[in-house]
Amino acid sequence: MSSGLAIQHQYDPLAYRQEVATGARRPNGARPLTKLTGKHLTCINYHLAGVKQGLIAERMNMTPAWVSMVLSDPLSQELIKRRFLEMDGELRALLPQAIQTLRDGLSPTMEVLVQDEAGDMVPRVVTTPMETRLSATDKFFKSQGYYTPKDKGTAGITAEDIVKEMLAQTRSGESTTVSVTVSKEDGNAL
């Protein structure tokens, strides 16, 4: 007849130190994982998706210490490293398409496929909206590190934001005066 109680092993400090010294335990005292279960993989997937450890613990109804133990385990680290390499390869493979998309966004016109009266898809040249071009320009310059707000009063305001506001004011139908001042020191518009 089973009482349903787990058998408790008595702690042996000498055996514990020997296990740490021989690698049977990790330096933090935890035994290394021998396999990754579904729960471990869920934890790793949350981590790879950028979820913070505290929130992973909350979502999985586990302790933050458990999440930390899983993510720092050598088996998990190996999988995380492999997934990062795979993602890096995917990003590198997408680079030519991203560059072409940026070119398309910066171009004053672009070719799109439209359906004609007969139902056939035919290429047409259309004007790229100014907002799309400004957004592409903004993303390009940000990615190249060309602009970082220097004045705390304008931190976070981009050229795209300023032009978008100017366009909104001109579309309102009211008379609008726009003035731009360029600093001679750094060439930035104020």
Image (tube, rainbow, N blue to C red):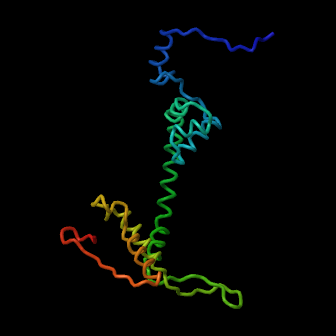
The C terminus appears in which quarter of the rendering?
bottom left
Q: Quadrant of residue 27?
A: top left
Q: Quadrant of residue 59?
A: top right
Residue at x-position 60% and y-position 36%? 40
**Residue found farthest to the front:** 174
Q: Position of residue 19 (x, y in %)?
A: 49, 17
Q: Position of residue 163 (x, y in %)?
A: 39, 75
Q: Position of residue 188 (x, y in %)?
A: 26, 70
Decide which of 83, 181 is in the foreground and name it.
Answer: 181
Residue at x-position 41% and y-position 67%? 139
Q: Is residue 163 left or right of residue 25?
A: left
Decide which of 59, 97 is in the foreground and name it.
Answer: 59
The N terminus appears in which quarter of the rendering?
top right
Q: Is residue 148 left or right of residue 90?
A: left
Residue at x-position 65% and y-position 38%? 38
Q: Is residue 172 left or right of residue 57?
A: left
Residue at x-position 51% and y-position 53%? 87
Decide which of 104, 53 is in the foreground and name it.
Answer: 53
Q: Taking 55 as reference, is 1 above or below it? A: above
Q: How many marks?
A: 0
**Residue found farthest to the left:** 185
Q: Taking 76 as reference, is 8 above or below it? A: above
Q: Position of residue 71 (x, y in %)?
A: 52, 36
Q: Taking 102 as reference, is 170 above or below it? A: below
Q: Is residue 58 left or right of residue 184?
A: right
